[in-house]
Image (tube, grey):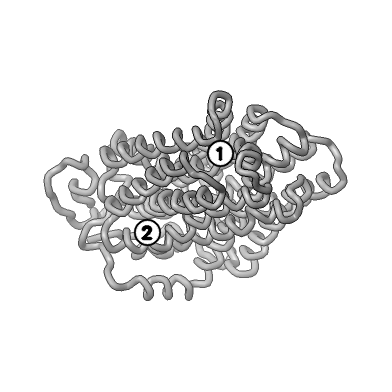
Amino acid sequence: MWGRNYLSPVVAKTETLTSPPAIDLSPGELIPTGRRFRIVLVLGFLTALGPLTIDMYLPSLPTITTDLSASAASVQLTLTGTLVGLAFGQLIVGPLSDRLGRRMPLLAGIAVHILASILCVIAPNLAVLGTLRVLQGLGAAAAAVIAMAIVRDLFNGLAAARLFSRLMLVVGVAPILAPTIGGLVLEWTSWRGVFVVLTVAGVAIMAATALVLPETLPPAARRSGQVLRDYGRLFTDRVYVGLILVAGFAFSALFAYVSGSSFVFQEEYGLSEQQFAYVFAGGAIGLIGATQFNVRLLRRWSPQQILGGSLIGGVVGGLVLLVLAIADLGGLVGLLVPLWFVLAMVGLAMPNAPAIALSRHGEAAGTAAALLGAVQFGIGALAAPLVGVFGGDATSMAIVVFGGMAAATITLYAVVRPRDLPVEQFDTPIVVAH
């Protein structure tokens, strides 16, 4: 089993790893319940750092457009910059964490995020703000990819799928609270105050990480000098590549909504910043509810089956959304109902695609999680400005949302071919270290 050195408090004395027990449990399932809860909670905070960084300033996008004398499309590029930072940062940090362990790259990344947030407060123009948003994304990337790698260090198979669903509950609080907090901040200060709040959040997350999260990758399991070989092995796995593309296309539908919603709801439908925050929270509740319902679905169906059903449902919902947006039927309610349904389908897909993909490459969990995250945020970065390029209205958002879900579904059945994946392969215990 895992030695106490890697699952005990940070200040513990040096101890060693022993051999795994002769029982069919993943390492994380051997952790005492209280300690496991604290670790999972911190993992949730880490994965929430990216959504907080993205979503908290959404209500202020129109204000930034006016304050910095920029166009809506150019301001949306600051969101794209964050996603680019999240994508490329993971490609760097993931392999580093496989080589150096999880804690050091994680704490360094959060420090970068804090510094970038401080500088965003005094950004003089849009170009500087966009650059700093890339750095924020790079810092948040460390939190995102290493949190996923730690899940893979500690859990496998259905246990990992369930934990990804539970983490989505914690992560889901960020999209609900972030725009609301942003709207409240804008009531008494400018958009720069949003980055003050992000600075404080970064400091709190860094402190919790340092105090609670142990090192989960022992020296004996670390890899050196194999980055290119690991990436090469990942790219030759058709199923893994297909799954990360599925996750990326589904993510693009989500980020089309994230990037376009503030302009659609505030400028096209006339909602205030606070009203937009409530509408955005409604979509986040649907997303979160679906991720938690996924835990119940896993008792009866495999992750492959749930993933396929959710994507088909997302395509149907996206098509209804597109038709209603083009025909301008139903007003705001006619737009929100199918849109929230699509978000719920994304919520079902999001825990299962990573769980299946990462179960195939436990020997290089950091690198595998990095490539998965990079593709997710990379495709999201491409999709986010498309809403503005196509016009920034409800129809533009609907086109990109539907396109993302359709691409994810086609990729799943044409490339991954889930019926070819034996359930036994997914459920096989994976030994992280001996």
State whether residue 126 is above or below residue 419: above
Q: Secondary structure at mark 1?
A: loop
At x 57%, y 53%, the residue is 80
Q: Which amino acid, by three-letter code, is at mark 1?
A: Tyr
Percent x, y for residue 310? Answer: 64, 50
Q: Locate residue 266 relative to residue 84 in the image: left or right.
A: right
Label of residue 93 in the image: 2
Observer able to see residue 310 = no
Label of residue 57 in the image: 1
Percent x, y for residue 403? Answer: 71, 57
Nearer the observer, 281 or 16: 281
Q: Which amino acid, by three-letter code, is at mark 2?
A: Val
Percent x, y for residue 203? Answer: 35, 37
Q: Locate residue 166 relative to residue 41 in the image: left or right.
A: right
At x 22%, y 49%, the residue is 6
Label of residue 295 in the image: none
Q: Secondary structure at mark 2?
A: helix
Percent x, y for residue 151? Answer: 38, 50
* The C terminus sits in image quarter: bottom left
Distance from the alpha carbon under mark 1 to that under mark 2: 25 Å
User: How packed is label 2: few (under 14 Cα within 10 Å), some, or many (20 or more)?
Assistant: many
Comparing labels 1 and 2, the label whose residue is closer to the camera: 1
Nearer the observer, 68 or 351: 68
At x 44%, y 52%, the residue is 135
